[in-house]
Amino acid sequence: MRRVVITGMGIISPVGNNIADYCDSLKNGRVGIDYITRFDTADYKVKIAAEVKNFNAADYYEDKSEIRRTDMFVQYAMGAAVQAMSDSGISDMDPTRLGVYVGSGVGGMQTFVSETKKLMDRGPTRVSPFFITMMISNMAAGTIAMRYNAQGPSMPIVSACATSGNTVGEAFRAIKHGYADVIIAGGAESTICPLSVAGFTNCLALSENEDPARASIPFDKERNGFVMGEGAAMLILEDYAHAKARNARIYAEVCGYGNTCDAYHITAPHPEAAGAAAAISLAVKEANISVNDKIYINAHGTSTPMNDRTETLAIKKVFGNAAYNIPVSSTKSMTGHMLGAAGAAEAIAGTLAIKESFLPPTMGYRVPDEECDLDYVQNAPRRADIDFVLSNSFGFGGHNACIALKKLD
């Protein structure tokens, strides 16, 4: 079995549109949550989101005419992929050994809304000929593959909020077992629009708190829903021998992956955290992690009442009493929930924690919850040398993913 390492990263997020700014935000507890500016929220219960700011798609496209033929989630994906590939230094390799595992939980929602409005207002002839290709969720992966002539394995996974946890994990497996040498892995999302906000609100998923500082408060007893975020995050996963042969900079090693399903409910996690605990256990076993190692857990931590309670329970089930000695935090307290991009954004946060020797904080935490009683790195980052990171991602439909990262020996 081959070793798999991270040699490049890129991000478009509510707290930074490049790795340096994203890292600086995590180190300083900078929150990217504020009032929605994309549309008038007067008639909406939810007023808050974590929007990407100051993004310019033209910075990342060689042919600027492509921009008008792509949904915003693809533009975000391209931005993060271009950054990651540039960061990796990869310039020439066998295209059949280069893959793209990039997913989206929702896909082209902005396009779906705008083209539906055209159909209703102006009739079927006014619907764009690019409607389908702009909407479908695989197009981020396809567009990135075309940009880099990546002819190897392609896996545009859709598993709701576990999407890019799964893309990174499945890319790890593909390289480990020899199906590719390099894979661009991650996720992208752009769903801050009237239809999505109304839909998530009406299924009781979103926080209706109008104070940005108290809207996304993972593990706090007063949490009442997640805050919708957006953006894209990409990691370049590479066979260790391939990376060493080209003298690549290596951030960390991917060393374990767990993938399970609760098979319980369309939105609610299993109340006994069975699937989540199983996913974490699988990643821990593959990574050969022990309770004596220096571990940090980047939690899924959505700020919903059920998720945070069951995730805490899952961690306790895996680690027993040692769970109380493991720092846990949720970067969604700063980025909001980036949905299909969340897993990859949080894997990047974990990688930066290893590389920069710090623990990102859980911001906005005030009121302890007796059912959430672990060390949540409350309100301020912490200096720490870390051996391993576990990054959890859980999604509607009961999908669970856990990625294990390791400081390179």
Image (spheres, rainbow, N blue to C red):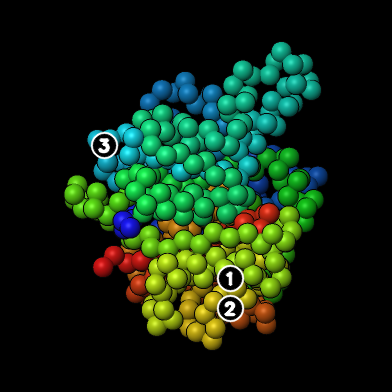
Q: Are marks 2 and 3 in contact (CB under 8 Å)?
A: no
Q: Which part of the image, by quadrant, shows the N terminus?
A: bottom left
Name which residue lies at 57% across and 54% down. 162
Earlier along the polypeptide chain: callout 2 or callout 1?
Answer: 1
Q: Which residue is mark 3?
A: 93
Q: Nearer the viewer, residue 397 or 391?
A: 397
Identify the mark nearer the N-term, 3 or 1.
3
- In the displayed structure, would residue 332 be above or below residue 38? below
Amino acid, disc 3:
Met
Q: Amino acid at mark 2?
A: Lys
Residue corresponding to mark 1: 277
Question: What residue is disc 2 on?
Answer: 317
Quick one: 318 or 357, which is closer to the camera? 318
Q: Amino acid at mark 1?
A: Ala
Q: In percent of the image, x 54 and y 44: which residue is there? A: 157
Q: Is 52 placed left or right of 211 in the picture?
A: left
Q: How far separated are the C-alphas under marks 2 and 3?
A: 44 Å
Residues packed near mark 1 inside 10 Å, few (<14), some (14 to 19) or many (20 plus): many
Give residue 282's position: percent from left, percent from top: 50, 67
* Label 3 crowd (10 A; few <14 / some 14-19 / many >=20): few
Q: Given contact means CB atoms under 8 Å apart, are the residues at marks 2 and 1 in contact? A: yes
Q: In which quarter of the view is residue 196 placed?
A: top right
For disc 2, the neighbor class at 10 Å (few under 14, some 14 to 19, many from 20) is some
* Disc 1 element: helix
